[in-house]
Image: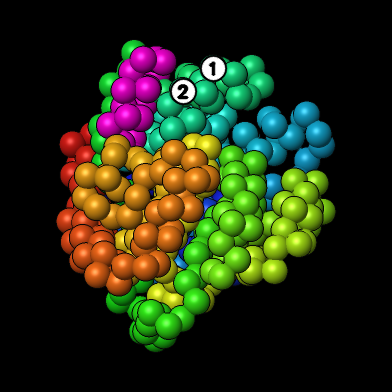
Amino acid sequence: MRIAIVAHNAYGMISGVQSGHIGGVERQAAMLARWLADRGYDVSLITWNEGGGPIETIDRVRVIKICRADAGLPVLRFFVPRWSSLNAALRVADADIYYQNGAEEVTGQVAMWCRRHGRKFVFSAASDMDCDRWIATERPLRERWLYRYGLRAADRIVVQTGVQAEMLKAATGLPSQVLPMPGDDLARHPGGPPRPNDEDSPLLLLVGRIAPEKNIETFIELARLLPDMRFLVVGPGDPSNPYVASIKGLSNDVPNLEFFGSADRLQLRELYLSATALCCTSHYEGFPNTFIEAWSLGLPVLSTVDPDGVIARHNLGAHVSGLNELRDRVQELAGSPGNRDAIAENARAYFQSNHQLDVAMERFERLFRETV
């Protein structure tokens, strides 16, 4: 079976070159491509041109480039070269099934090509917003129309949680299938310090790009309330972006909070291992890769969002409603080594049963086989 994965920003993740945007969608696309290629499938990954030749083979994955993200003239570049080069790449891939993750106009463009050429198309939602708000009001009319068309034309729709399935059904009437996302088992990576002992100052992490939906303001306020603990924001943030500048300005008088910037996989593993908990203060999420990574190492997650209630149901940390409850749960966790150990055991077991690479990928493999 020939499988093509469309992930415009995934070149940096598959190649190891730190170029362009790398987030959860890109990490999952690269993991899926490599895993399928290792299983003997003919796999293509379609990305922006961020270097190298027009077609490269990386880890047995054929990487097919469309145009550069900044190519063409404003307005016109939507059609030429972006859409035209995407169509050309889809044709070169010549796959039996095409897979794309995340709500965007590309969803409709890929679905349209597949319909026209008799190929199968699988779409995967990347967040709660993909199943509701994106459809209704978040984007310009052209983008919303193409995304809605892509949903209707998809042969299968994958969502991350049962809540997302319900949201999508209510918004569109379309059925979907819940598949837990795969995660990198950081416990299998060598190196890294031991877990902190009780004499260490507790370290709280927030991992993710600096963006309004992440609500980092609450994390900063938490640091103000707990001056004896250390707080670290890990993730990219363009200093020229007004929101990023405002966030860093808010933290100027908070000496126990630092901005680490982007971290590679080894650095991230070491930070998780050094931490007392991973915090999430987001207004909304899908099923964050950071949660999965933290649980692979037995790190508790204290979060304002709880995808499908797994944090509460499996005792993987705590689901909190706001700043004060978050503060209380942080203090309880920091003061209870026994509770941390129990959560660590639960987290590893949950990760291995639901998000470990082979377990999660085999579900995707079955879905692709059933679709074709």
Q: Looking at the image, which residue is at 30% across and 72% down?
A: 337
Provide the secondary structure element on which disc 1 rests: helix
Residue 209's spot in the image, x, y percent? 60, 54
Within 10 Å of the Cα at label 2, are there few (<14), some (14-19), or many (20+) other Cα atoms?
some
Answer above or below: position of 147 versus 193: above
Q: Looking at the image, which residue is at 62% across and 34% down?
A: 83
Tell me how many marks there are: 2
Q: Is residue 350 rendered to the left or right of residue 100?
A: left
Which label sits on residue 136? 1
Residue 311's spot in the image, x, y percent? 30, 48
Which label sits on residue 302? none
| Relative depth, front residue between 54 and 28 | 28
Way the structure is coloured: rainbow
The stretch of residues the image draws in magenta is 152-172
Please tell me in which quadrant of the rendered image residue 100 appears: top left
Residue 41's spot in the image, x, y percent? 28, 56
Q: Is residue 270 rendered to the left or right of residue 104?
A: left
Look at label 2 and name its amino acid. Asp
Residue 302's spot in the image, x, y percent? 41, 53
Q: Of helix, strand and loop, which mostly describes the magenta segment?
A: helix
Please tell me in which quadrant of the rendered image residue 259 appears: bottom right
Q: Looking at the image, which residue is at 52% across and 23% down?
A: 133
Within 10 Å of the Cα at label 1, are there few (<14), some (14-19), or many (20+) other Cα atoms?
some
Disc 2, disc 1: CB below 8 Å?
yes
- Please tell me whether residue 18 belongs to the stretch shown in magenta: no
Is residue 21 visible from the viewing direction of this image? no
Look at label 1 and name its amino acid. Ala
If the image is split into quadrants, where does the C terminus sit? top left
Is residue 273 visible from the viewing direction of this image? yes
| Relative depth, front residue between 41 and 15 | 15
Q: Is residue 88 rendered to the left or right of residue 163?
A: right
